[in-house]
Image: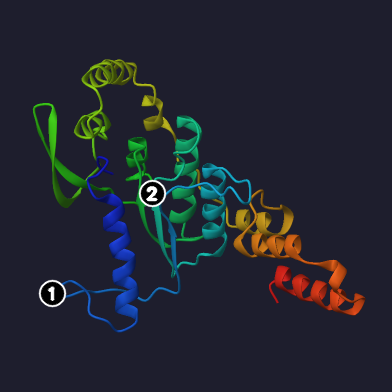
Amino acid sequence: TGPNMAGKSTYMRQSAIIVLMAQIGSYVPADSADICICDRIFTRVGASDDLASGQSTFMVEMSEVANILRNATKDSLIILDEIGRGTSTFDGLAIAWAVVEYIADSDILGAKTLFATHYHELTELEGKLSAVNNYCIAIKQQGESIVFLRKIIRGGADRSYGVEVAKLAGVPSAVINRAREISDYLADEDVTGKVKDLKVEKSVKNKKKQEETGQLSFFANAEEMSITAELRSMDLNNMTPIKAMLYLEELKKRLCGN
């Protein structure tokens, strides 16, 4: 956790790059490093929609998350940057919480993960899940301004300092002052205070099996999306029947994973 612009995304991206550099035998920017071998590196960083496919920013994000959760292993490295922010606050928090539970469960996944979020309620998972540890990027507050210290320290951030960052960006003072009033009011109301009492759900081993065998994913994985795009662009008028049958058989094998 940490304020906007503090360096969370940069820290996670460089960590993924360092792992990749180490595995190809390259130097890494450190005096020494102890880095385990990863079978794959999965990232969900940044936010953009997909106009060509008619997918919103949130749909693109969830499709990528679905692909990661279905294809990562315990030996993978997962980088997740602020998932769940493209929908309502409580839906986003609920999705982010459930994703952390899923990844942290060694019976289901247990992959090494760096997870950045502005949902500070998620810091409550430390102590409830043995595999979860909180780290934040240190800052120093000077009056109504903040100074980014660029240091990773143990523990969770107490707030995101979004209003202070908005002030640094040049947002009009009238908006900043009103935002502070609203922020203070919402903090007093403690709209997410009940999260501390939320119990962690212990996942059952057969959950993953049930998902894979008995239910279809609402979100298509990358291979299915690729096949869909190929089918849309296929020119049937210029294909012989036998060629069309062979192509269909090839797509079937790809869908079945053969």
The answer to which of 132 and 144 lies nearer the viewer is 144
The answer to which of 202 and 36 lies nearer the viewer is 36
Image coordinates of residue 25 in percent, x first then y, are 30, 84
Give the residue drawn at x 52%, y 44%. 57
Give the residue drawn at x 24%, y 44%. 5
Disc 1 element: loop
On screen, residue 159 above or below 240: above
Q: Describe the colour scheme in one phrase.
A: rainbow
The answer to which of 124 and 12 lies nearer the viewer is 12
Q: Is residue 108 left or right of residue 229?
A: left
Identify the image quadrant of residue 32.
bottom left
Disc number for residue 31: 1
On screen, residue 134 above or below 209: above
The answer to which of 181 and 177 lies nearer the viewer is 177
Disc number for residue 129: 2
On screen, residue 178 above or below 212: above
Q: State the residue lying farthest toward the left.
A: 142
Label 1 crowd bin: few (<14), some (14–19), many (20+), radius 10 Å: few
On screen, residue 54 above or below 146: below
Identify the image quadrant of residue 180.
top left
Q: CA distance from mark 1 to mark 2?
A: 32 Å
In the rendered structure, which amino acid carries the disc numbered 2? Answer: Leu
Disc 2 element: loop
Q: State the residue lying farthest toward the front.
A: 238
Q: Is residue 92 left or right of residue 142?
A: right
